[in-house]
Amino acid sequence: MANPVPSACCVVLAAVVVVYAQRHSQQDSHIQYERVGADVTMKCGSMDWDAAVTWTANGTDIDDSHLNGSYLILKNVDLTQSGQYSCYEGSSWHLKYQTYLRVGTPPKEPVLMCRSNNYPKGFYCSWHLPSPTYIPNSFNISVIHGTREMVCEKDIFPKNRCHIRYLQLFLTVKYKVTLTVTNALGKNSTSLTFDEFAIVKPDPPESVVAKPVPNNPRRLEVAWQNPSSWPDPESFPLKFFLRYRPLILDQWQHVELLDGTSHTITDAYAGKEYIIQVAAKDNDIGTWSDWSVAVHATPWTEEPKHLTTEAQVTETTSASTSYFVPPPTTKICDWWAVRPWQCVGQLDWSWLLMVSSLFSEYAPSWGHERWGWVLGGHGGLRGSDVVGKGDTKQAVGEEHWV
Amino acid sequence: MAAADTPSATTLRRRDLCSRGIRLARKMRSDVADLLDIYVERQGLDASISVAAVEGVPAAAAEHWSEQTGTQRLLDNLAAYRAFRTLLAQMLEEQREQLGDADAALGRALAAVLLQVSAFAYHLEELLELESRGPPGDEGDGPPAPPRLSLFEQKLRGLGVLRELAQWAVRSVRDLRQLARPGPGAGSAPGLAEGQ
């Protein structure tokens, strides 16, 4: 006698297959693209207009108010109405029609850019859409050079880029690059025409380093490297533009350097932190690179001198860099803010005499605003300034700069 | 040891000539760019107009540029600038015939560039002398006599000449820089850049 279990399984399996076939035998499943703001009418496959049907959107029943007979009417569609729409026969719930609605826009004019950062090897073009279309787009790029059509090889990454190798150099004939973007709702294109030299723009210099120069409070040494993408700097040397400013100022200073990959800044403000950047350009053609990553550096500053009976006190009466620091036998009291003789017990007498003589000459009144005269002009300290060596810092008082 | 590292007199002379040649070429390029602006304006042309390759005008375009030997570079440059010397003289003559003294600025600019082209050609001859090759003879060089062209065709031809000269000025800077690089010798040293 035959085993009944395998037979039962076969029957069940067959039934499942039949039901599945019935449900999918009359339904169409595809993708439908519609513009934002359009009115969309969906027919329930081959069902008659007056057939009883149920529509769902992403599995949720759609209200009958959107139906005209068995047709689904969507007015003024928006992006949120993208999704899977299904139509079922009234009582049997057989799936009669299914579509995936993608609401989007036709492409706007794409933005195209071509550049040679590896001259004389070749150039690349990259593109993007100024606004999303919300549906898939395809891009086609053509490059014409004179009468010759060239192949722009698509990069694996990023996807919206392709590159061309120069077959000849020093041509007067221009390149014309045309990019066409197409989607289910429309197409758009843009073109660029340029000559070989105009698009040359190196990448920024790399590995920019700035260091203080020992015993030189107004110098900073800056060094950098050619961008690694520039293939032959010996045959096609780059020149550089260096800009720098102290953090406390907005105005940059600039230096153009026709050779070498280093420079010493000699007019830095003592003790001020600087921000420095470098850009590169081929010596003869093209445009400047973007600025490099910014580096920060502070010029070397002298450590505070400790005054003793043998030490000389430095006076700050000129515009040159000079310091006025309290003697080490003094605690760092706020002597800017108080009369010096209030610290008498802690002060060296020779220092006190010097302070008194300066004070009587330049600051007959006790107003704090006068203290700036004592320190002098450029290079002198403000009360909020710091002294130290390299990156070490030590506060010397409150801000009382005039 | 020290003597082996010291560049020879020939090498030093070559570098000096190349440096001066690069400066000449850069100045020439700058002046040709100014001349192009004047020419386009005076001749009533559109600066963006495309001009087909002009017969008799040496093309600066080079395939496998980086693989050329130094001597080949010099010979190509010399042939080009000798041709430009003749072409610019023809343009100057045409300009005087057409405009006379009415457009002195264009005439002066053309003459100035012609002078620089002549000077550069002479400079290249010096470099070739240094390579112990000696410059080739000048007889028979240069473009053929210009065909009989309409006035507009003459203007387009002139535009093509100046544009090509501008390209040559850039190429010459590159060629001389290659020539000045230390190597086994200008006669046999190709450029190092690959992919051309």
Image (cartoon, rainbow, N blue to C red):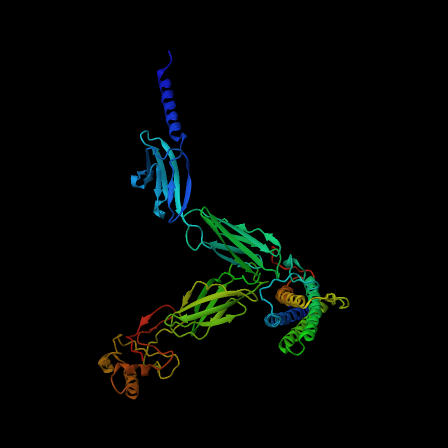
> Residue at the spot x=39%, y=39% of the render?
A99
The percent coordinates of residue B76 (x first, y second) are: 69, 63
Q: Is residue B100 above or below residue A357?
A: above
* Residue found at the far top of this picture: A1
Left or right of residue A347: residue A20: right
Instruction: Confirm whether residue A13 shows in the render.
Output: yes
Q: Quadrant location of the C terminus of chain B?
A: bottom right
Would you place residue B1 above or below residue A187 in this image?
below
Left or right: A136 in relation to B138: left
Residue drawn at x 49%, y 68% is A241
As drawn, is A83 to the left or to the right of B6? left
The answer to whether one can see residue A63 in this image is no
> Foreground residue, B109 or B167?
B109
Quarter of the rendering containing residue A49 = top left
Q: Which of A172 and A168 is in front in this view?
A: A172
The residue nearer to you, when weighing A193 against A215, is: A193
Q: Residue A367 at what x, y percent from top left?
A: 25, 83
Instruction: Point out the residue furthest to the front here.
Output: A50
Instruction: Tally the numbered discs.
Output: 0
Question: In the rendered view, would you say A261 is above or below A88?
Answer: below
Picture layout, residue A250 above or below residue A81: below
Write down the quadrant of residue A101 in the picture. Answer: top left
**Picture coordinates of residue A299 (x, y %)?**
41, 71
Say left or right for A41 vs B98: left
The one nearer the camera, A205 or B53, is B53
Residue A195: % across, % down: 57, 61
Image quarter of the N terminus of chain B: bottom right
